[in-house]
Image: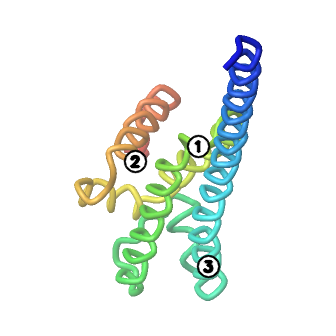
Amino acid sequence: MSESTLTWIEIVGGVASLLGIVAVLVQLRQVVISLRSTARGATSAIGTQLKDVFIAYPHLRPYFFDDADPTGDPDQGRIQTIAELYCIYLQEIAAQRAHVRGASGDAWFALMMAIYQGSPAVRAQLERHSAWYSVELRSTIAVIKGVLARESPVGPTGD
């Protein structure tokens, strides 16, 4: 082979390599977009289930939004089950926040904090069964407790 043939082969090989790298980068970008979409879809599904619960049982809303103590309520079993579902929701958000940045990640953190702050049933579930939940959720709850302790002289549970 002549020297010019080798040069053309090297040039074509180099161009093909560059095109391959560009194709991989485009695919990685699509994977990131897909992960973000999946994150939102997973949390939306659980959030919709929770909204459906409160459509069916609106009298239980104060136990999850108004910091009302459910002790003694005849629907105690249902309240505990909803608290478990909320904890699964929080766990999903905590796991997916890594794929959601900026204002959306901040909004998810604010949602987690509001759920934790507004529900003694959720707080009790997390305290009673912390080992059931991911390290990400437990770490996020520790941060939330710290934020709430700094915001209120009486602490996050109103004690």
Residue contact between numbered discs 3 and 1, judged by CB atoms under 8 Å = no
Inter-mark Cα distance, 3 to 1: 29 Å
Question: Which three-letter amino acid code belongs to the residue tagged 2?
Answer: Leu
Residue occupying the point 58% across, 81% down: 53
Q: Earlier in the sequence, mark 3 or mark 1?
A: 3
The quadrant the C terminus occupies is top left
Inter-mark Cα distance, 2 to 3: 24 Å
Label 3 CA crowd tier, 10 Å (few <14, some 14–19, many 20+):
some
Label 2 CA crowd tier, 10 Å (few <14, some 14–19, many 20+):
many
Depth check, mark 3 against mark 1: the one in front is 1
Q: Quadrant of residue 28?
A: top right
Inter-mark Cα distance, 1 to 2: 15 Å
Can you identify the residue that label 2 sits on? 137
Residue 60, image x, y percentages? 54, 77
Question: Which three-letter amino acid code belongs to the residue tagged 3?
Answer: Phe
Residue 89, image x, y percentages? 50, 62
Q: Earlier in the sequence, mark 2 or mark 3?
A: 3
Residue 61, disc: none
Residue 17, image x, y percentages? 67, 29
Label 1 CA crowd tier, 10 Å (few <14, some 14–19, many 20+):
some
Residue 72, image x, y percentages? 34, 78
Decide: is 116 above or below 49.
above
Q: Is 134 displayed left or right of 1 in the figure?
A: left
Q: Is 129 displayed left or right of 38 in the figure?
A: left
Relative to the observer, which residue lies in front, 105 or 51? 105
Residue 54, disc: 3
Can you identify the residue that label 1 sits on? 99
Q: Secondary structure at mark 3?
A: helix
Depth check, mark 1 against mark 2: the one in front is 1
Question: Which three-letter amino acid code belongs to the residue tagged 1?
Answer: His
